[in-house]
């Protein structure tokens, strides 16, 4: 199973790029970077630039978008950036993409992002074009005019984010993998079965599954954990029982059991944000749990 986590913030609030080397030394498969540009004062950084900085300081670890918001950016610009990052990193990109969760936010409005009803359509159109553009093939981005980006790059694995039926169908049609988040192993079992049904209906291969979540593994995590569970109830409308089962907590042995449960439910990869303090120690504990689950 692939294991991914995101970078902590340094004392200035910026992503701590140097910590990517720590993850690489611990054997992590990828550094993940979310796309959380909202524009209301919430800290957010351009994921492509952050991952380019990670590429410059590492040599092996993958660079994973978790996930890039397709409707917010011109498709040709996304393709050029991914093509460039593939060349600079030696083909280490994992391109997680989604329709985005903040269509009414100030940044979306300022950037001319799609409105609620347009996001899926724009994402599908982008997914049709991206592999051809990244691969250096002619593509008609504007009707009647072909665009060719060079030099051609290896098309990275494309993971489609989202827990909905529409996201699962999009993953089957356009992606190499499906990337649900904030989901328990029990809930994933049913979703994975439905994903296989959709693939069978469409006559397509079954995508891999990469689960995203949050872990609380070291230090005084009680307050952070309580706040996180409450946010799942208030913002995501989960029941208290379901919300309590989402965060990953406990000893390395307990976390290894949780990773094994995700694998049994159909997951090929797990990406966990490390919350609650002492990031470096949490990264070590998660790496230890991953090694136990693989034993």
Image (cartoon, rainbow, N blue to C red):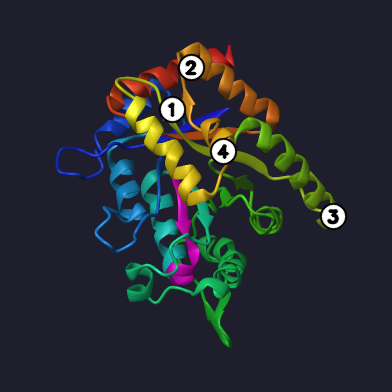
Disc nearer the start of the sequence (3/4): 3
Q: Are marks 3 and 4 in contact (CB under 8 Å)?
A: no
**What is the x, y in percent for residue 101?**
47, 59
Disc nearer the start of the sequence (2/4): 4
Label 3: state its secondary structure: helix
Residues at marks 3 and 2, CA–CA distance in whole angstroms:
37 Å
Answer whether residue 66 is magenta in the image: yes
Q: Residue 28 carries which label?
A: 1
Residue 61: quarter of image: top left
Question: On the picture, is 192 further left or further right than 128?
Answer: right
Residues at marks 3 and 1, CA–CA distance in whole angstroms:
35 Å
Q: How many neighbours does mark 3 have within 10 angstroms: few (below 14), some (14-19), or many (20 or more)?
A: few
Label 2: state its secondary structure: helix
Residue at 56%, 74% in the rendered image:
118
Residues rendered magenta in the picture: 62-76
Q: How many neighbours does mark 1 have within 10 angstroms: few (below 14), some (14-19), or many (20 or more)?
A: many
**What is the x, y in percent for residue 48?**
36, 54
Residues at marks 1 and 4, CA–CA distance in whole angstroms:
15 Å
**What is the x, y in percent for residue 236?**
51, 49
Disc nearer the start of the sequence (3/2): 3
Reading the image, the residue beneath label 4 is 211
Reading the image, the residue beneath label 3 is 201
Residue at 43%, 50% in the rendered image:
86
110 or 149, which lies in front? 110
Above/below status of 117 relative to 177: below
Single out the residue that lies furthest toward the bottom: 144
Reading the image, the residue beneath label 2 is 289
């Amino acid at each position: 199973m692939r294991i991914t986590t995101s970078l902590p913030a340094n004392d200035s609030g910026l992503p701590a790029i140097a910590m990517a080397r720590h993850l690489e030394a611990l054997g992590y498969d990828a550094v993940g970077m979310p796309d959380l540009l909202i524009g209301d004062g919430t800290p957010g950084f351009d994921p492509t630039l952050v991952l380019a900085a990670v590429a410059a300081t590492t040599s092996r670890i993958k660079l994973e978008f978790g996930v890039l918001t397709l409707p917010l950016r011109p498709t040709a610009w996304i393709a050029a950036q991914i093509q460039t990052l593939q060349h600079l990193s030696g083909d280490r990109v994992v391109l997680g993409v989604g329709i985005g969760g903040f269509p009414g936010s100030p940044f979306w409005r300022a950037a001319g992002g799609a409105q609620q009803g347009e996001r899926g359509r724009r994402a599908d159109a982008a997914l049709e074009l991206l592999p051809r553009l990244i691969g250096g093939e002619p593509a008609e981005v504007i009707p009647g005019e072909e665009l060719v980006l060079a030099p051609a790059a290896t098309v990275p694995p494309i993971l489609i984010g989202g827990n909905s039926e529409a996201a699962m169908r999009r993953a089957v049609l356009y992606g190499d993998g499906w990337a649900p988040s904030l989901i328990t192993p029990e809930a994933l079992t049913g979703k994975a079965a439905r994903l296989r049904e959709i693939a069978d209906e469409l006559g397509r291969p079954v995508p891999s599954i990469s689960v995203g979540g949050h872990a609380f593994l070291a230090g005084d995590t009680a307050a952070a954990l309580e706040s996180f569970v409450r946010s799942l109830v208030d913002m995501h409308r989960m029941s208290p029982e379901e919300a309590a089962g989402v965060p990953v907590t406990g000893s390395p042995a307990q976390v290894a059991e949780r990773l094994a449960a995700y694998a049994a439910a159909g997951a090929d990869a797990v990406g966990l944000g490390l919350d609650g303090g002492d990031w470096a120690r949490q990264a070590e504990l998660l790496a230890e749990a991953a090694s136990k689950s693989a034993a």
